Amino acid sequence: MFITFEGIDFSGKSTQISLLTDRLRLQGEEVLVVREPGGTIISEKIRELLLDRSHVAMDAVTEFLLFSAARSQLLREIIAPVLTSGTTVIADRFHDSSTAYQGFGRGLDIEAVNSVHRLATHGIEPDLTFFIDISVDESYRRRALQGREIDRMEALDASFFQAVRTGYQAIATEAPSRFITINGMQPIEDIAKAIWDAVSSRRPSRKESS
């Protein structure tokens, strides 16, 4: 099973990925967690380029193609082989991030973006995608609470992140069978339960614990 998590920055994806991973492992499943961009030697080098705040002159198309290149390498080198072995893969971001961030956020042509997706994903689609939805104001509030240095993408302005959020909402409308929107303003345990219920419903042959 291939599960992906999406959302604007500071939506709580990492927390929910950790909780789901632990619960699946308690069920006896092999689970691999990956992140985008990154996960391989090549993809991590691309990550450094993309997130370095000194690269202010990076073109939107360059940015998109770098994300796509990192994704392709991660799929070919890690995700595809692991999926064939029966391991569950959980990804912190996948191609929906590029649709939302570079398509809607940067204003790139969505048809062109989807064309590159078809090449870079090698025909692999997530079985289930969770969009943890929070407001842009909440994202900024959580960022301030963390008090860490932010990267090049996180440093973008509120209008950009509002466009990204709108993009995710559009994807949710277009792919309702795969894309599940969860209110990220709820308590952590309520979000985790909604995620677990959705995952469990896609694994009917397994006996679930309550």
Image (tube, rainbow, N blue to C red):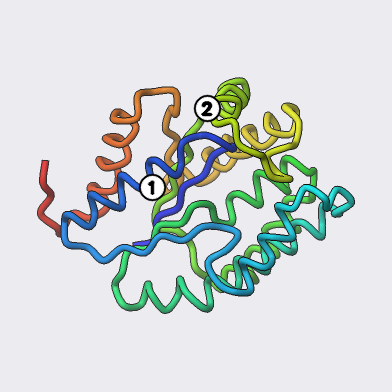
Residue 49 percent across, percent down from the top left: 74, 60
Labels 1 and 2: the sequence-earlier one: 1
Residue 192 percent across, percent down from the top left: 31, 36
Q: Is the residue 195 above or below the residue 144 in the image?
A: below
Residue 120 percent across, percent down from the top left: 63, 69
Q: Secondary structure at mark 2?
A: loop
Of the residues shown, which amino acid type is indicated by label 2? Ile
Residue 17: mark: 1
The residue closer to the viewer here, 155 or 70, is 155
Residue 31 falls in which quadrant of the image?
A: bottom left
Give me the C-alpha separation between circle 1 and circle 2.
16 Å
Residue 44 falls in which quadrant of the image?
A: bottom right
28 vs 46, left or right, is left
Q: Is the residue 151 above or below the residue 119 in the image?
A: above
- From the image, tell me which residue sits under label 2: 134
165 vs 24, left or right, is right
Q: Which quadrant of the figure contains the N terminus?
A: bottom left
Q: Secondary structure at mark 1?
A: helix
Disc tally is 2
The residue closer to the viewer here, 97 or 155, is 155
Residue 33 percent across, percent down from the top left: 40, 60
Most distant residue in the right direction: 57
